[in-house]
Image (spheres, coloured by chain):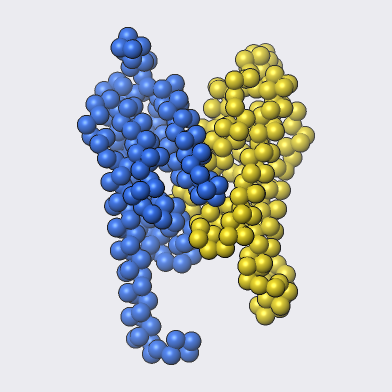
Chain colours: A blue, B yellow
Amino acid sequence: MAATGLKKGGIYRHFSSKEELALEAFDYAWEQAAAGRLAGIREVPDCVDRLKMMIDNFVEKRAGLVPGGCPLLNTAIDSDDGNPALRSRARIAMQRWTNRISAIVSEGIHKRQIDAKVNPRKLSQIIISSLEGALMIGRIQGNDVALQNAREHLDHYLEQNVRAASGKSRRVRAS
Amino acid sequence: MAATGLKKGGIYRHFSSKEELALEAFDYAWEQAAAGRLAGIREVPDCVDRLKMMIDNFVEKRAGLVPGGCPLLNTAIDSDDGNPALRSRARIAMQRWTNRISAIVSEGIHKRQIDAKVNPRKLSQIIISSLEGALMIGRIQGNDVALQNAREHLDHYLEQNVRAASGKSRRVRAS
């Protein structure tokens, strides 16, 4: 109160609006980012190809859609001991993103496009970890080499360890 | 302040600027983090096992050694458009960490412990991306599930796609 010269009520009003502003900004940025990542994937019938498209979207569209990068990556750092409401908002967004990817994996298992041994939640986290980590490296290095590299790695992993054996042979026959 | 025993004014008097203080703090935090990650790996003769130990160190020791998490992850966000000297310091630290892992991979290829088709620089980036991304997820989720998951994934990947075929058969004979 001494520092700001505001009365107690003034400080609370100021803090609550600032917090609200941060939440609104996060929601907007996340909506944009999620829309970019999920663009066009509903139209892809094969679930492994759908995962690959989401990865593609992340790598290709991230720069144009969200100028500041991934809102989750930003929030992971900023809200560490700062804004608990923002942290909980980020946690919910992360859960939703994980659920979204897990649902694609589960559908793929159900349709026998994805190996039944794959754990949907674990695979989702592997994909998200690799992409977010590569984004962070790219930010430090000032280029997208790590992101391109992560895509190559994930694509190869999905074909080799995730796609069901029957799907692999269909692909071979088709090519 | 806790580390130096100096009061706030004393800390600022010690460094010529806030930027310099940030650089010194980064160097100190990075030194601690790197020491934790590389602890004991020289004594491991097999290069794949050495990579696995480094991953183990990252997953297990990260909390104790650097209270604020990974200095690179923090800096990736903070110095995005802030302190350019800090950003360049982070870039050098990232390069050194990549070089360190690449050197282990190259040695492993030379000793025929690692498949000659593996690209040392790409593999280094995959390992770093996965770990840093998992650290970031863990920070949002408030637990280390993503880190444990990343370790399991990387260990499996190293055994399946990185270890040389001769090394695999040696391991089977030994067990």
Number of callouts? 0
Residue A68, image x, y percentages: 41, 56
Q: Can residue A174 be seen in this view?
A: yes
Q: Residue at x 40, y 31 (%)?
A: A119
Can see residue A110? no
Question: Which quarter of the rendered picture does the C terminus of chain A lie within?
Answer: top left
Q: Is A61 rendered above or below residue B7?
A: above
Residue B52 spot, x, y in % from top left: 63, 33
B172 and B162: which one is in front? B162
Image height of B162 relative to B165, above or below: below
Tell me: residue B161, above or below residue A89.
above
Of residues A135 and B166, the one drawn nearer to the viewer in this rendering: A135
Q: Which residue corresponds to the image point at 48% horizontal and 41% vertical from the top-left? A: A144
Q: Does residue A122 appear left or right of residue B96 in this picture?
A: left
**Residue at x-position 69% and y-position 59%:** B28
- In the picture as drawn, the residue positioned furthest to the right comes out as B43
Residue at horizontal 36 percent and vertical 31 percent from the top: A52
Rendering coords of residue B18 (x, y %): 63, 71
Residue B107 place in picture, x, y as percent: 72, 27
Q: In which quarter of the image is residue B156?
A: top right
Q: Which residue lies furthest to the left in this view?
A: A43
Q: In which quarter of the image is the N terminus of chain A?
A: bottom left
Q: Quadrant of residue B60?
A: top right
